[in-house]
Image (cartoon, rainbow, N blue to C red):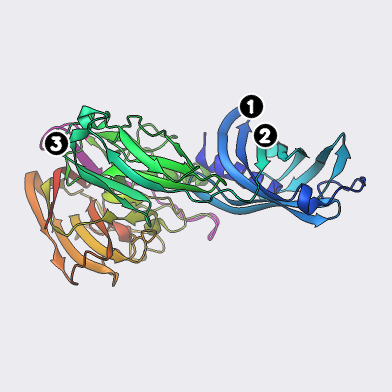
């Protein structure tokens, strides 16, 4: 399903929750709402699109408060869909009617929403009875010829439930599974970043990582998903969701703390395009930028017909490697400045440790460089080869990424870099705008290279600009780019960088 459509529909759902006066029918006087009905409800949310479930049993709490003698407000806090945060959602001043001991909510609304959705009809009905709240919303999205159904069910809590949602202990016990003996030492739990990392023996294979069985201790009265004592595939980070007794949630990411990357294992990067893949954690790519360009181009009439700009190379230095390419993405000025971005003429391929979260209006902000790092890196080694493209396009004003000049006097170079930087919180990232200039940088190594036709060893020796302090928090980024000035939307079409057998040397 088109990602843009999904986000639009979720925004529509949020809009439904913002209307007021759910019913203006007069009803009988009720017992005090603040004692009978008001409170926190623990439950789950389901969403269907044309009868097909797109969200199922998403744990969520709602808060019901008194709005009048016969009216209530409902609030759903911190609602998000995937990586899209939609904030707090409210149903305000919902008037109740009584039927056989049940309190009923019913309303039909005409919603006037932003394009491309426009006006649509929403029917809302719900009941509150015996401490259970149920709310159903049916939306007819006329402009898109789609029907959305939202259903929430929750049970009122007493107020004495625990809110603690923590992983207290996470180990691999060789008495549980023999393969667990490959884990070296105890995993490290970082409560602030909600990450758990562990090391494994050099003899550990991808098959071994699929058989590890964690033994997990969590807060009293909390629950965990996936379950404790079940083997997980730790070739990729595994996320554990802890749900407290009162519905409070925390998500921990558990991963192998590796120092050697052979790029043999690749995973899907997009549900919309099967050709977009990336090496397994902790690597990210700029491929999702290509996905954004494809989607935006379909609106603007600018068609990118090329493939992913980071992909597997079957003939790496040893086995599978990574191939990184600078693409001609055609270029197109924004049709609505401030609403839609421009499409760049040149898009450089990049492979890096960290995450890529699309920010269409500021593409350099999409690259969230670096992973939490708990050691002092000294160098990054590996093998590369590079072929610069023949046509170099220079962008004199990066704010107008679509406007470039063909420059026969310039030749492209690749970029191999490593950056260690300090953070106050693991919520912080450096991005494409500041990763080489920020005052948070502790250590840096950069190498630029032109035509290198055969695989050649590289050794990035980090130069420390500040003293390393193991008591502080750090992120470590390794960044490979097919055009060293790609962040300024300059480079040569078809410049190609191959990378393989990367190793981090720690002190």
Question: Which one is nearer the viewer's eye here, 466 or 60?
Answer: 60
Whole-percent x, y for residue 10 in the image:
60, 44
At label 1, counting other C-alpha atoms closer than 10 Å, the crowd grade (few under 14, some 14-19, many 20 or more) is few
Q: Secondary structure at mark 2?
A: strand
**Is residue 225 found left or right of 253 in the rendered image?**
right
Q: Mark 2 to mark 1: distance in Å?
A: 8 Å
Whether residue 286 is visible, yes or no, is yes
At label 2, counting other C-alpha atoms closer than 10 Å, the crowd grade (few under 14, some 14-19, many 20 or more) is many
Magenta-drawn stretch contains 441: no
Q: Mark 3 to mark 1: distance in Å?
A: 46 Å
Query: What is the magenta segment's predominant secondary structure?
Result: loop
Residue matched to label 1: 51
Q: Earlier in the sequence, mark 2 or mark 1?
A: 1
Locate the C terminus by quadrant: bottom left
Q: Secondary structure at mark 1?
A: loop
Residue matched to label 3: 316
Whole-percent x, y for residue 426 in the image:
36, 59
* Closer to viewer: mark 3 or mark 2: 2
Residue matched to label 2: 149
Whether residue 307 is visible, yes or no, is no
Q: Is residue 188 above or below residue 47?
A: below
Question: Which one is nearer the viewer's eye here, 78 or 47?
Answer: 78
Q: Quadrant of residue 106?
A: top right
Q: Are marks 2 and 1 in contact (CB under 8 Å)?
A: yes
Point 75% across, 38% down: residue: 130
Q: Earlier in the sequence, mark 3 or mark 1?
A: 1
Magenta stretch?
Answer: 313-339
Q: Mark 3 to mark 2: distance in Å?
A: 49 Å
Label at residue 349: none
């Amino acid at each position: 399903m088109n990602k843009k459509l999904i986000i639009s529909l979720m925004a529509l759902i949020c809009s439904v929750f913002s209307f007021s006066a759910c019913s203006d029918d007069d009803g009988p006087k009720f017992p005090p709402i603040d004692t009978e009905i008001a409170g926190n409800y623990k439950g789950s949310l389901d969403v269907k699109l044309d009868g097909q479930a797109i969200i199922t049993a998403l744990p969520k709490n709602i808060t019901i408060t008194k709005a009048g003698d016969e009216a209530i407000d409902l609030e759903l806090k911190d609602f998000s869909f995937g990586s899209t945060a939609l904030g707090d959602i409210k149903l305000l001043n919902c008037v109740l009617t009584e039927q056989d001991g049940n309190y009923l909510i019913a309303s039909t609304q005409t919603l006037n929403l932003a394009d491309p959705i426009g006006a649509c009809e929403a029917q809302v009905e719900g009941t509150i009875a015996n401490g259970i709240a149920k709310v159903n919303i049916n939306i007819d999205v006329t402009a898109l010829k789609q029907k959305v159904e939202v259903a929430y069910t929750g049970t009122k809590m007493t107020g004495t439930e625990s809110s603690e949602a923590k992983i207290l202990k996470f180990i691999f016990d060789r008495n549980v599974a023999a393969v667990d003996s490959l884990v070296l030492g105890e995993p490290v739990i970082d409560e602030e970043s909600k990450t758990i990392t562990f090391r494994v023996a050099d003899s550990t294979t991808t098959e071994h990582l699929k058989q590890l069985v964690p033994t997990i201790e969590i807060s009293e009265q909390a629950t965990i998903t996936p379950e404790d004592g079940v083997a997980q595939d730790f070739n990729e980070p595994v996320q554990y969701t802890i749900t407290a007794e009162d519905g409070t949630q925390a998500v921990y990411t558990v991963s192998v703390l590796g120092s050697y990357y052979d790029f043999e294992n690749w995973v899907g990067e997009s549900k919309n395009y099967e050709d977009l893949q990336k090496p397994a954690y902790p690597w990210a790519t700029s491929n999702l930028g290509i996905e954004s360009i494809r989607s935006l181009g379909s609106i603007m009439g600018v068609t990118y017909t090329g493939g992913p700009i980071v992909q597997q190379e079957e003939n790496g230095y040893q086995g599978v490697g990574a191939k990184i390419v600078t693409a001609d993405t055609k270029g197109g000025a924004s049709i609505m400045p401030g609403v839609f971005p421009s499409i760049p003429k040149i898009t450089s391929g990049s492979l890096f440790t960290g995450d890529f979260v699309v920010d269409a209006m500021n593409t350099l902000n999409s690259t969230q460089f670096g992973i939490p790092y708990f050691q002092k890196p000294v160098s990054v080694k590996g093998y590369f080869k590079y072929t610069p493209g023949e046509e170099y396009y220079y962008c004199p004003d990066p704010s107008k990424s679509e406007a470039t000049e063909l420059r026969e006097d310039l030749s492209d170079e690749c970029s191999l870099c490593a950056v260690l930087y300090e953070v106050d919180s693991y919520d912080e990232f450096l991005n494409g705008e500041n990763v080489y200039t920020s005052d948070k940088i502790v250590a840096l190594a950069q190498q630029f290279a032109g035509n290198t036709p055969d695989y050649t060893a590289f050794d990035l020796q980090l130069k420390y600009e500040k003293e390393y302090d193991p008591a502080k928090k750090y992120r470590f980024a390794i960044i490979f780019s097919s055009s060293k000035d790609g962040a300024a939307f300059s480079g040569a079409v078809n410049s190609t960088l191959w990378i393989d057998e990367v190793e981090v040397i720690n002190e």
